[in-house]
Amino acid sequence: MVRKLRRLPKVLTKSFRKEYYQQPGTLPGTIIIDEDAEYPTIFLIDYNQTNFIRQQIATPEECVNYLDTESISWVDVQGLGNRDILQSLGNVFDLHPLVLEDVVNMAERPKIEDFDDQLLIIARMVVPKEKTCGFYSEQVSLVLGKNYLLTVQEEPEHDCFEAVRVRIEKGKGIIRKQGTDYLAYALLDAIIDGFFPVLELYGERIEELEEEVIVKPTPQTLQQIYQIRRELLQLRRAIWPQRDAINSLIRDSGELISDEVRIYLRDCYDHVVQVMDMVETYRELASGLMDVYLSAVSNKMNEIMKVLTVVSSIFIPLTFVAGIYGMNFNTEKSPYNMPELNWYWGYPICLALMGVIALGLLFFFWRRGWLSNSVTVKRD
Amino acid sequence: MVRKLRRLPKVLTKSFRKEYYQQPGTLPGTIIIDEDAEYPTIFLIDYNQTNFIRQQIATPEECVNYLDTESISWVDVQGLGNRDILQSLGNVFDLHPLVLEDVVNMAERPKIEDFDDQLLIIARMVVPKEKTCGFYSEQVSLVLGKNYLLTVQEEPEHDCFEAVRVRIEKGKGIIRKQGTDYLAYALLDAIIDGFFPVLELYGERIEELEEEVIVKPTPQTLQQIYQIRRELLQLRRAIWPQRDAINSLIRDSGELISDEVRIYLRDCYDHVVQVMDMVETYRELASGLMDVYLSAVSNKMNEIMKVLTVVSSIFIPLTFVAGIYGMNFNTEKSPYNMPELNWYWGYPICLALMGVIALGLLFFFWRRGWLSNSVTVKRD
Amino acid sequence: MVRKLRRLPKVLTKSFRKEYYQQPGTLPGTIIIDEDAEYPTIFLIDYNQTNFIRQQIATPEECVNYLDTESISWVDVQGLGNRDILQSLGNVFDLHPLVLEDVVNMAERPKIEDFDDQLLIIARMVVPKEKTCGFYSEQVSLVLGKNYLLTVQEEPEHDCFEAVRVRIEKGKGIIRKQGTDYLAYALLDAIIDGFFPVLELYGERIEELEEEVIVKPTPQTLQQIYQIRRELLQLRRAIWPQRDAINSLIRDSGELISDEVRIYLRDCYDHVVQVMDMVETYRELASGLMDVYLSAVSNKMNEIMKVLTVVSSIFIPLTFVAGIYGMNFNTEKSPYNMPELNWYWGYPICLALMGVIALGLLFFFWRRGWLSNSVTVKRD
Amino acid sequence: MVRKLRRLPKVLTKSFRKEYYQQPGTLPGTIIIDEDAEYPTIFLIDYNQTNFIRQQIATPEECVNYLDTESISWVDVQGLGNRDILQSLGNVFDLHPLVLEDVVNMAERPKIEDFDDQLLIIARMVVPKEKTCGFYSEQVSLVLGKNYLLTVQEEPEHDCFEAVRVRIEKGKGIIRKQGTDYLAYALLDAIIDGFFPVLELYGERIEELEEEVIVKPTPQTLQQIYQIRRELLQLRRAIWPQRDAINSLIRDSGELISDEVRIYLRDCYDHVVQVMDMVETYRELASGLMDVYLSAVSNKMNEIMKVLTVVSSIFIPLTFVAGIYGMNFNTEKSPYNMPELNWYWGYPICLALMGVIALGLLFFFWRRGWLSNSVTVKRD
Amino acid sequence: MVRKLRRLPKVLTKSFRKEYYQQPGTLPGTIIIDEDAEYPTIFLIDYNQTNFIRQQIATPEECVNYLDTESISWVDVQGLGNRDILQSLGNVFDLHPLVLEDVVNMAERPKIEDFDDQLLIIARMVVPKEKTCGFYSEQVSLVLGKNYLLTVQEEPEHDCFEAVRVRIEKGKGIIRKQGTDYLAYALLDAIIDGFFPVLELYGERIEELEEEVIVKPTPQTLQQIYQIRRELLQLRRAIWPQRDAINSLIRDSGELISDEVRIYLRDCYDHVVQVMDMVETYRELASGLMDVYLSAVSNKMNEIMKVLTVVSSIFIPLTFVAGIYGMNFNTEKSPYNMPELNWYWGYPICLALMGVIALGLLFFFWRRGWLSNSVTVKRD
């Protein structure tokens, strides 16, 4: 008996509930391991203009040797399910306790923290879901050092860095000739560009709803509009701080970012602003759709009421007339008691009267435009 | 059976979907050729105070000689459908890879980029559609050098530069005496002025809807209000960054812009602000119209309900009275069984009773103002 | 058949359509003469502490002699319908082409432009309409020089400077002892003060609507609220840039404005802020009225529905009972066929039954408060 | 016949209409005497650490002697109904014409004006009305000199300075040991603290409306919500500029304010921000109440419609069945003409049929929850 | 008879009413003791790297000796019900009168005040209520000196500092090695982290309401949405100034905060921003829910009206037909008087006619989709 509306996916609140916060009063810098988190997989890519090494390693310690060399080392950790590995990661890269906490805590806001010889970049990556219109949202932390880059991803499943790995391996573009700052830029650019396919899905879905909401608004339509608004709200929360982060990366960051890479970051910044623009546009459209929905429902009600009113207003008076001549006043007792019943033309006159009443009312409704309107809609 | 509502043109989302983004992870600076794009046509105008040359050229290389001279060279590329030509354009004008990408990518936000010896201006031009109230939106990129100006337009069809070409050819105004910065200003001014005719159309359409929404609101009205809001949203997205761009052109740009031209740019800036003002005003009006629409629909419902209520409330009690005297209680079995039926004045009294009831109710409705109102509306 | 709603005056859009923009691509500095514009009338007032001359002149050239003297010359041009006069105005006062364009183009935003030896002030003056609640809006341009002030008004009909002229002529206040900057302040002050009577009309009209919207909301009420919102939007567009203009006049303008006059301009600035405050307040009130209107319409619907429901719910069951005893089952064929019809107390019992049903329903409605409410409203 | 809704008090617009503005073109610095204004009463308090004098004086000239002494003189003028006294006030305190105009014009925005040796503070004081939930709003001007303080109040009736007078007289706190700046602070603090009791009333009234709007929304509720929004708008207009004024008093004012008093003013500033906070909170609550009201009215409508639908939908089909067997087809002419009428069980079967229909419909409505819902509400 | 809606808890207004303000005109620095306040309990914790003392003391004077030592003294006062103790607290810690007032006045906005050798931090702590979804809100004041920290809490019941006390006692983390600034940070961090569990409750409740509002909207749903909005408004008022306070602590505070602690405070600042983000997100969701609620109620109305219209529109015409043949025209007087009654197939033809009418109407409604829709919903 309960109406089966598609349940709202618990996207938003889930991410808050589980991961967002530590118990109040927790020691700052505490690492909390989510028991559902996957075991960390660590990939090492070490390259310079001539050499390229790509391998999976078991523990952070294995990459210590690479870090000391002049070549660029990119250590990519996927999954956060083991405290020891994370701890040794902290040791190997000499991370401040708060950095380690930020990296592990999966619900940080995107931001930049500058620690003189290290630069912490927290970003948020989105990946479109395959079937429905939604997205996975995952935190990516980048720790940028002089000749190494540490990236930490929440889960190994979704990843938007493969294209960058291929570019390094095949030496496409200038990536092999540049430093870690360019690598960080390339990854950030891949993260930002990952928002566009997600937004494309929302564009399509809003377009579908625009038609649905006017032609055939149902409670499901309402639910979908609400859901889109909710998810766009989430996208917005992911992208706004990213803009600030990239902006302060361009302006405030120290010597770890070269001037040449700053030009590229400006391009990246333009893309972030484009994403924000689109999110805001979609939000306004979705909010406008809600208004349209409400009006469309009222319109439907008007049509329903018109039918009821036309039918009732015509037949109720007619029924009254018929009721009059259904009364049983005794015509024999008095010449005033319903003499019409005995008239020769009584019945035809009565029918004619009804016809006149009906036509009069129809004319009244037709002039108001209620009739023609209903008919039109009927014929379409 | 499906109601034939005019389908919403897919203006907004189309431009996003096709052109807005490259595949995530694409190499920065990659040029992507849209297969529907038209083959580039290249026009060269070279002039100084005394000479004027205007010709179509086949490849960018043909204009190399003109670039070296002191005279001002304006190279205008229309259409983006060939990679080689775009690439050689990059070589001839010595464009940074990111500049070339911005120029080719047709969904950039308007902006200014300063590369010391070159100034990249991305602008957005709108052209009103002839029949309906809508507009084509097209990106125009300007690359301003010391004595050359490169402009790249998305399509050859729409163009708002012809008036400027004529002014150069005929030597009207001071354009032949000024440098490339004045030429760039003249083109920007033509782009901005192109927004006014589009806005005029929206002004007229809003005016029509203002009347329609109060006198005769239909679902089509709702749809049109929504569409106007959507298109104004799009105009707004085109004009806001343009303001910032022109503002930073006035304040921040280096030596490529002379002080005299800055005065003209301030005039151009005033026009951008006027456009923004009008867009915001129209947006507020359209948003107010939505409220009015909702209220008007409720008003209509009220009128419908009044008719139903007046008719039903009068005739249902009367029908009940008629029903009473249509009962078949056996008057012969008891003097209490409907003796009225045998009264001499039974029927007239009954009719009189009905008349009294009807008049009483009419009076009740008249005092509430429901009656007079319906009648008024009927007579109009 | 069409309902005669008072047509919305086309205030807003008219001013945009006709005058706002030049054809795109027009030469900057072009003067466009609106064919409906009136022929310019020129008034010259020349005064110093001792002398005062006031005369109408035919062409701008006639005032050249006055401009060179130490005394203050105020040239007031009313009407814009002749190109030659405007052009010679430009020559006499040595105006930059863009200044002349701004002065003639009647839809500029209020602003300040500083040209070292001249200060252009574009302002917007409003004059209340006599009968209806509306206003004429007219652009006034002031060009302030060392010892002259040129003012250009759109039309000769409306003018709010007469009080200032009288003050000069009669030597009231300190105006004869001060320079052109004080004169410009006095005119600006008169322009700003002209907004208050217009706002007073809106205050009164909103007050009337506040009562109307709750006591007796009609579609006309809705239309009027919308119109007020529209006109306040227009006032807002006129007053906001005026604030910025006066502010930059106080802070940024050069030596043409003396420190003493700056104190007076601060007073003028306070008035502009007051006007803005009132406009915003009225806008919020009008927007709140729209909400109230919608609620009031819903309330009316509730009352209508209550009447319908009470009447229908009482009489439909009664009619059913009457219908039962109007059936023609043959009582002679069976003792089970409507024996009630032959009972001695059949009819009274039937009537009593109906009475009980009616009272029961009345009690039900009374407890819900529907009955009492309708009655109350009826009696008021 | 007109519904007696409590008329909206004309608080807002009155203050605008009468006092807000002078006739456009009035000479700056003109003093306009409102004919309803009361005759000014002047109180003088003169004190230092040891002495205290408090007396009423007739004309401003009487206090000249006190102004020259080292002791602090506080001249408090209440009422503005006499031009001569105001003029001589200007002479005695050597006020700039614009200051005098500001002091007399009762609708200035709160602000600070610094005239080197004098500091003009315009503030706005509110006093709760005793019976209804509203407030009187009155302008208070403070002119702070080296060893005197002039305060001008609009009316003698409402006053929130008595507590300060008592503190001076009894020498409570440090007020006798401090200068005029501390006295000005003490008065400003009293003015700001006067907002809290007014806000408390609104808090209570919103709380009452919160219950009313859900349990029993009536048109009066709507009116009250609108009125609260209107009055909060007015409070907001009074308090916002006060914040800016106190802030610039702390930061920008010259030597007339000592550093120690600045600390106290910071406390006062905190209170202003609290008041603003509360006003904004109440505004949001009132705006939310409007939404709730609209929803509650719709809910009521739903309940009404449910009753109508349930009753009509059950009895209309039953009446139809009864109507069938009330037809007069001649059973004797044909065996197909209503043979049911002559059946032995005809009538019972007919009643049973009706019962089945009624139960079926009841079941239908019960499963939809319409029935139970109505019943529940009935029982509460 | 009054509907028993869960009463809104008077959370918001209570805190304002009782504690927010002192009587206008009160001497600044006055301490007002709320008669319901609990008697102050004082705890002293004194520690350095090696020693740790934790004890309850009766009067502030008992801790004087500890304050002079090099070790860090944390004095925690819980409850504000005794004037003498508060006064002697002021003496022992040498507090400015305004500081003491701020500490005792329980409705201050969170803020920072810098008094060179002391730093006053006013913060607001929230504690979730156990059963319902709400929270207790309590002010906490921190006075930070060179080697002491005074904290004053409103009530002893709720406390979020226990975890910090344990950390000090057990020497966990670096807290024993750091100064009072780190201790203050640790407490602030505990206060901010205390917001997350409260927000989690709101996240859950919004999720529940999201389902309820679409599947089964009731007046209670409306009330709950309003209440959540109200409480989130309150949370927002608590957290916004906290952000500003912590921000100015990081940037502006003097030597009492070391650079190392500033890094930790930046982490704390990130958490505040997260809290604000979540509050704003929840506010937007709750506001969207209100729209959905309104639409859902309209949808319900549509369904109700559809049933009424379908039933009425089918049976009212049928009843009219039955009424016709219930008329008593005398068939014997004329062959035109209802000859159908005497036809052989009269009754079957009449029934067939009714069937055709009913089917026609059903078809009409089915094509409009009203029928199928109602049925679908019924079956779910």
Image (tube, coloured by chain):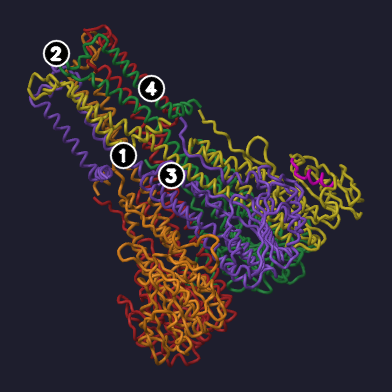
Chain colours: A yellow, B purple, C orange, D red, E green
**Numbered mark located on residue C372 in the image:** none
Residue B215 lies left or right of residue B80; in this view the side is left
Total marks shown come to: 4
Residue interval drawn in magenta = A158-168
Q: In the image shown, does A19 or C300 lie closer to the viewer?
A: C300
Amino acid type for the residue under numbered disc 1? Arg
Amino acid type for the residue under numbered disc 4? Leu
Measured in 3D between alpha carbons, the distance from the residue under mark 1 to the one under mark 2, in whole angstroms, is: 44 Å
Residue depth check, mark 2 versus mark 3: number of the one nearer the observer: 3
Q: In the image shown, does A87 or D88 lie closer to the viewer?
A: D88
Measured in 3D between alpha carbons, the distance from the residue under mark 3 to the one under mark 1, in whole angstroms, is: 18 Å
Q: Are marks 1 and 2 on the same chain?
A: no
Q: Chain of mark 4?
A: D
- The residue labelled by disc 1 is A368
Mark 1, Cα crowd under 10 Å, few <14 / some 14-19 / many 20+, is: some
Measured in 3D between alpha carbons, the distance from the residue under mark 3 to the one under mark 4, in whole angstroms, is: 44 Å
- The residue labelled by disc 2 is E332
Amino acid type for the residue under numbered disc 3? Thr
**Numbered mark located on residue D359 in the image:** 4
- The residue labelled by disc 3 is B221
Mark 4, Cα crowd under 10 Å, few <14 / some 14-19 / many 20+, is: few
